[in-house]
Image (cartoon, rainbow, N blue to C red):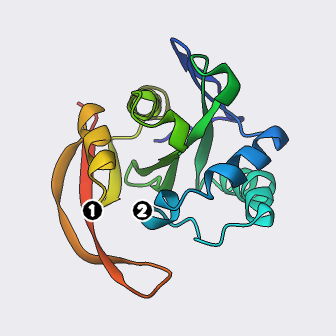
Amino acid sequence: MIWWPTEIPILTHGLITLRLASEADIPKVYEACQDPLIPRFTTVPADYRMADAEFFIREKGPTHFAQKKELLFVITDGHIPDEEFCGVISFHTINLGNHVAELGYWIAAPARGKGIGTTAAKMITEYGFVTMGFRRIEALVDVANETSKMLLISAGYELEGIMRQKVTRADGSQKDMALFGKVNQ
């Protein structure tokens, strides 16, 4: 059985923190999502507006948490005092009966290449297995996103296969997705 927290916990490892999203994160989410790489490889729309960031932080995150659909964290790093906001990471597409969750994330451009995303993935994965009781955590990555594939491998995930034409992008194109998984042993 999956244990679901009553509130979003604070997870820390060194200077990396995973925490509840706040109002102060809205402009940071908006600014980060202007980077064309984020909509290229995620479900974030290319024409991301401030209203989208407001909805994401104020409504989607809290509603999905209450419905046990998503556990969303903001990633921050004390190494970057001027750019503390580093991105978001979550469990979503949760199947409580099968003890499975999907890991999703995006990292803001200034935080990329510093190991922050890998550390955040390790942190949330450990929390998912040890505290929540998931038996399997998956991640789907656009096959062209080499950086994200390396992040998952560094976090202990294994490539399990390619899911052909799994995702439809906003422009109507179909994208193959690499399926990564990690099981609790």
Name the amino acid type tagged 1.
Ala
Which residue is pictured at 43% across the width and 55% down the height?
A: 97
The answer to whether residue 47 is above or below residue 137 is below
Instruction: Give the label on residue 144, or none.
Output: 1
User: Which quadrant of the structure image shows residue 8?
Assistant: top right
Tell me the number on the disc at residue 41: 2
Q: Amino acid at mark 2?
A: Phe
Percent coordinates x, y for residue 82 in the rendering: 69, 25
Residue nearest the viewer, comparing 85 with 94: 85
Labels 1 and 2 touching (C-beta < 8 A): yes
Badge 1 local density, few (<14 within 10 Å), some, or many (20+)? Answer: some
Q: Is residue 1 above or below residue 64?
A: above
Report whether residue 108 is seen: yes
Quadrant in the picture for the C terminus: top left
Residue 175 screen position, x and y as percent: 31, 75
Q: Residue furthest top?
A: 14
Residue ID at (38%, 50%): 100
